[in-house]
Image (spheres, rainbow, N blue to C red):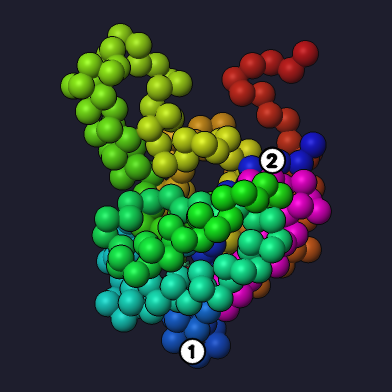
Amino acid sequence: MGPRHVAVIMDGNGRWAQMRGRPRLFGHHAGAKRVREIVESCPGFGVKYLTIFAFSTENWKRTQSEVAGLMSLFKRYITGEAEALRKNGVRVRFIGDRVRLDPKLTQLMDELEQMTAENDLVHLTVAINYGGRDEVARATKRLARDVAAGKLDPEDIDVETLPRYLDTRVLPDPDLVIRTSGEARVSNFLLWQSAYSEYEFIDTLWPDFTPEEFSKVLARFGKRDRRFGGVKA
Ligand code: IPE
Ligand code: IPE
Ligand code: MG
C-alpha cells in the first residue's frame, strides 16, 4: 500500500541556483514550477493528501530581498495556478501563522481555499510561515482559552485533544515525509503529526525532483514495515 498522506520539505532551491551561477530567487522560481507536476501526479499514485513546506517561521532570518522575493512568488503562484488547481480537483489549504503575512497574500490564500473548497481529488496543504513549535504554541493558547472559558476540562485533555487545535486538525497524519537536497533534519516541520511517519531523505535538489523519482520513493515506502511500537503478527 502506498502512502495516503505525503509531506514534502522542498529543500535545495538556493543550491540549485548557486550551481548555475544564478541568484537564489531563480531557484525558488524553478522550485515553484515543480510543484504543479508533483501535485498532478498524486491521483495516479494514490496520494490523497500532499502537504508541502514553502516557508518556515525561521525563514524570516534570510535577507530582506530573498524574503520579499518569496512573498511575491507566493502571490504570483496563487494567482497563476488558482484556476488550474480548481479545474483539476485540488482542494487547497494553508497552514502556518497568517498574522505576520502581507494582507494581500492572506486574501489570495483565503480566496483559493474558498474557490477549491468543493474539490476532493487531492488535498494540497501549503505551509507558509509554518513552524511545528509555533503551531503547538498557538494551539495551546487556543486550548487554554477554552479551559479558561469553561468549555474544556483539563482532566479531559489527552493525545486526541491537542491535534484538534492544530492547524492540521482536518488532516490525517503524514504517512511519509520526504526531504530533498540531502539534509537529514526536520527543521520544525509537522513535529506533532510526524510521530510515526516514515522519512525519506533524498539527495536530489527540489527543482530537479520529478514525478518519476516521486514514484520510486513511494515504491520504497510500500516495502517498509510500519509497526507503530507493536510487533508484527
Ligand atoms: C527551500 O530551498 C525553499 C525555502 C526554504 C523557501 P532553500 O532556499 O532552503 O535552498 P538551499 O537549502 O539554500 O539550497
Ligand atoms: C526548511 O528548509 C524550510 C522549507 C523547506 C520551507 P530550510 O532550508 O529553511 O532549513 P534549514 O535551515 O536547512 O534547517
Ligand atoms: Mg534549505
Q: Residue 47: x and y, percent?
A: 71, 47
Residue 220, x across and y down, in percent: 76, 46
Q: Amino acid at mark 1?
A: Arg
Q: Choose the circle earlier in sequence order: 2 or 1.
A: 2
Q: Is residue 51 above or below residue 146?
A: below
Compared across the picture, whether 56 is left or right of 114 comes to left
Q: Does residue 224 belong to the magenta stretch?
A: no
Does residue 31 belong to the magenta stretch? yes
Q: Residues within 10 Å of mark 2 (few under 14, many from 20)?
A: some
Residue 204 is at least partly visible in this image: no
Report which residue position mark 2 lands on: 4
Q: Quadrant of the N terminus?
A: top right
- Residue 99 location, quadrant: bottom left
Q: Secondary structure at mark 2?
A: loop
Q: CA distance from mark 2 to mark 1?
A: 36 Å
Write down the region rendered in magenta. Answer: 30-50
Identify the residue under disc 1.
Answer: 22
Q: Nearer the viewer, residue 93 or 54?
A: 93
2 vs 1, front mark? 2
Residue lying farthest to the bottom in this orientation = 21
Residue shown at the point (62%, 69%) measured from the top left: 83
> Horizontally, is 170 left or right of 140 in the view?
right
Q: Is mark 2 within 8 Å of ligand 2?
A: no
Closer to the camera in the image, 39 or 227: 39
Residue lying at the far left of the rendered structure: 148
Query: In which quadrant will I find the C terminus?
Result: top right
Tell me if residue 151 comes above or below residue 34 in the rendering.
Answer: above
